[in-house]
Image (cartoon, helix red, strand yellow):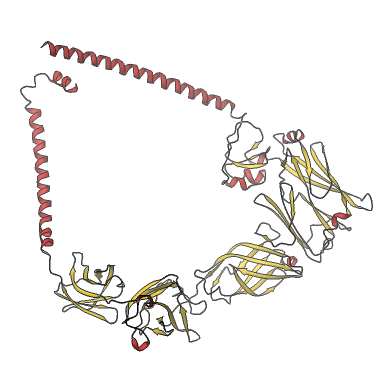
């Protein structure tokens, strides 16, 4: 008895200690959460106070689209992009914390404009003096003051220059000398590139063309933006490109080709190489293509409209490609080009699509390309003719020497432009002769495959019935009758595709009908049965198709197209020449046992589960209403149970 009292006292003390411990842990957790919450609240408040004034730039991924923008306006017009004035670059979602010079909308972008002034020549060695001035406006963040306190320089290649700052303007000046024209033998002009840099960073102007200026060796009217030149400037992979093409009728420049690119002050003159403009500018671009889609057969006339085509075509040869295919018989008018499409190459598996490329080649071999933004599309026509059907690569076909079985030939253009006329399969024998199937291929219902019957091979046509395995791999192809102009066409399969002549014929032993209505046929050498090659007939029933759903070496399963009547015997036809009579497979005794045992086992298991469920409910009800006689103190019993 004393032992029981001691145990009860110990349990009560233990519960008291545990309760105290739980309270202590709860208080500690409360203090911890309270302290953390206060710290978070303090940090958040300080962030709100200092966010407008300080800013650190988070390193952004090179994959963001913001990095492809090279002016403040184009950058801030994109969502989640900001322009850093001090770095002259566009970033995505900067973590603003320490600079005033981050612009988030185009209204805050400083505007830059360029003024060029020329003075009369000072000596016989000079053409003139050039003054290149950059002005800043809309400067709400006082960026000019930052530039005034920066290391400002004018940068240009091949010419001497000087720089000064005057009343919010950056002025670059140079003297243009006659020897600058020595390398420009073809034209009486020279183009110069000026850069304004601060702290080693190039100032990005609003207009890509403004860093360029053209100087003439002879007197010229001031109006250089005439109707005889086309100019284009754009940014591409951090390079600024400039193209200027002029007609020989231009009074200032004559026939001129000028290509310049630069990257951060490094200038490259694009002479002696092929140049391409990818629909970047209003003055040099393909504005229209009609029609935008034609058949692969060729012979369609298309019209291409090019802005300033009359200028570019002057004394230049014009050629056109559409989706990588030559467009022949090119004819130019002042605004348009017409040409006639040619068929793609015969080994083209898919109808090509792509841009239109107009190429201008000058007499000295300089090539200039204008690529369209429009996509030109070939499609497969609906009548027979070029281009011809093509058989796919690496096909493995299987058949027997008697022929007449079905194989599927994969490829392209079996419907459109079509094998509308009959076609049949052929194989190439080792003696180089060709053996053709005796029946035509099925009418194709898909452009990418066609079902054909295999040819019969025997000694009369040069086939060795005892041929070793390595000679049983034959090349194959298609003969298309009346393909075009009522002439037959041979479509040879690739050298990597083979027709395998099987040494063993299919052997059928018996069959059985499954519960779902499918028919299982047992035998040997059944792996290569084609899905569409089986016909079956039961006693006193019509012949029906039986679609093969799976095939293995010793059996195949097929699904009849109508319900079947159980019969002891079945007639089977495989292909054109293989016929069999097979009997119903006898039931295996072990299978019969399982057919009867499984349903009964399910019933017994379900009955036992119900019995135990009802018995459990009864025991719970009895315990609740008739408690055990030895359960005197429920509270004490509960405490002891918890221990």
The answer, for residue 361, to whether it is visible in the render is: yes
Looking at the image, residue 442 sits to the left or right of residue 247; the answer is left
Q: Would you identify the image quadrant in which residue 335 lies? A: bottom right
The answer, for residue 420, to whether it is visible in the render is: no
The structure residue drawn at horizontal position 23% and vertical position 78%, both measured from the top left corner, is: 543
Looking at the image, residue 118 sits to the left or right of residue 464; the answer is right
Looking at the image, residue 251 sits to the left or right of residue 570; the answer is right
Extreme bottom residue here? Answer: 460
Give the x, y percent position of residue 20: 30, 15
Give the x, y percent position of residue 111: 72, 42
Give the x, y percent position of residue 534: 27, 75
Extreme right residue here? Answer: 123
Along the line of sight, which residue is nearer the eye, 621 or 262?
A: 262
Extreme left residue here? Answer: 629
**On the rendered image, what quadrant is the C terminus found in?**
top left
Total labels: the figure holds 0
Q: Would you identify the image quadrant in which residue 430 lies? A: bottom left
Along the line of sight, which residue is nearer the eye, 78 or 568?
A: 568
The structure residue drawn at horizontal position 11% and vertical position 32%, both measured from the top left corner, is: 620
**On the rendered image, what quadrant is the N terminus found in?**
top left
Give the x, y percent position of residue 187: 83, 62
Q: Relative to 78, does residue 268 appear above or below in the rendering?
A: below
Looking at the image, residue 219 sits to the left or right of residue 318; the answer is right
Along the line of sight, which residue is nearer the eye, 286 or 263?
A: 263
Q: Relative to 615, does residue 350 appear above or below in the rendering?
A: below
């Amino acid at each position: 008895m004393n032992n029981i009292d001691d145990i009860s006292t110990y349990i009560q003390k233990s519960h008291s200690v545990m309760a105290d411990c739980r309270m202590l842990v709860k208080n500690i957790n409360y203090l911890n959460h309270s302290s953390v919450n206060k710290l978070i609240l303090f940090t958040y408040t300080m962030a709100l106070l200092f966010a407008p004034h300080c800013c650190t730039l988070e390193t952004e991924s090179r994959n963001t689209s913001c990095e492809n923008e090279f002016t403040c306006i184009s950058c801030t017009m994109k969502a989640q992009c900001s322009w850093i004035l001090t770095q002259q670059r566009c970033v995505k979602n900067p973590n603003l914390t320490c600079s005033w010079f981050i612009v988030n909308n185009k209204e805050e972008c400083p505007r830059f404009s360029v003024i060029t002034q020329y003075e009369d020549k000072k000596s016989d060695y000079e053409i003139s003096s050039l003054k290149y001035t950059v002005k800043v406006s809309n400067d709400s963040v006082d960026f000019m003051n930052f530039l005034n306190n920066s290391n400002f320089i004018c940068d240009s290649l091949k010419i001497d220059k000087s720089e000064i700052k005057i009343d919010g303007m950056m002025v670059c000046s140079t003297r243009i000398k006659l020897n600058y024209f020595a390398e420009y033998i073809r034209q009486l002009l020279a183009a110069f590139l000026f850069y304004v840099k601060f702290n080693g960073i190039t100032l990005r102007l609003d207009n890509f063309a403004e860093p360029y200026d053209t100087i003439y060796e002879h007197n010229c009217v001031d109006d250089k933006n005439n109707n005889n030149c086309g100019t284009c400037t754009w940014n591409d992979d951090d390079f600024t490109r400039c193209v200027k093409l002029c007609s020989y009728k231009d009074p200032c420049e004559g026939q001129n080709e000028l290509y310049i690119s630069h990257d951060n002050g490094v200038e490259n003159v694009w002479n002696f190489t092929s140049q391409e403009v990818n629909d970047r500018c209003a003055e040099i671009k393909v504005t229209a293509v009609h029609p935008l889609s034609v058949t692969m057969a060729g012979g369609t006339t298309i019209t291409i409209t090019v802005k300033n085509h009359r200028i570019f075509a002057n004394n230049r040869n014009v050629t056109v490609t559409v989706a990588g295919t030559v467009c022949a018989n090119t004819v130019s008018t002042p605004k348009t080009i017409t040409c006639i499409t040619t068929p793609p190459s015969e080994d083209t598996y898919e109808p090509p699509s792509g841009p239109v490329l107009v190429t201008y080649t000058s007499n000295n071999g300089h090539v200039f390309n204008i690529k369209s933004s429009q996509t030109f599309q070939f499609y497969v026509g609906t009548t027979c003719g070029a281009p011809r059907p093509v058989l796919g690569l690496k096909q493995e076909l299987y058949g027997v020497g008697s022929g007449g079985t079905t194989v599927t030939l994969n490829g392209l253009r079996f419907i459109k432009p079509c094998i509308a006329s009959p076609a049949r399969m052929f194989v190439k024998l080792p003696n180089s002769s060709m053996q053709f199937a005796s029946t035509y291929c099925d009418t194709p219902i898909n452009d990418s495959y066609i079902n054909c019957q295999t040819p019969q091979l025997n000694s009369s046509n040069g086939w060795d019935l005892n041929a070793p395995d390595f000679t049983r791999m034959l090349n194959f192809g298609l003969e298309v009758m009346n393909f075009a102009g009522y002439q037959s066409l041979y479509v040879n399969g690739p050298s990597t595709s083979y027709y395998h002549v099987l040494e063993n014929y299919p052997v059928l032993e018996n069959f059985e009908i499954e519960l779902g209505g499918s028919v299982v046929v047992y035998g040997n050498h059944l792996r290569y049965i084609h899905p569409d090659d089986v016909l079956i007939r039961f006693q006193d029933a019509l012949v029906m198709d039986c679609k093969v759903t799976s095939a293995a070496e010793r059996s195949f399963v097929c699904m009849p197209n109508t319900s079947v009547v159980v019969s002891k015997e079945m007639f089977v036809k495989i292909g054109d020449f293989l016929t069999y009579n097979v009997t119903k497979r006898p039931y295996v005794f072990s299978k019969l046992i399982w057919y009867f045992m499984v349903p009964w086992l399910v019933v017994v298991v379900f009955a036992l589960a119900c019995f135990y469920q009802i018995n459990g409910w009864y025991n719970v009800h009895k315990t609740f209403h008739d408690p055990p006689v030895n359960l005197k103190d429920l509270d004490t019993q509960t405490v002891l149970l918890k221990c």
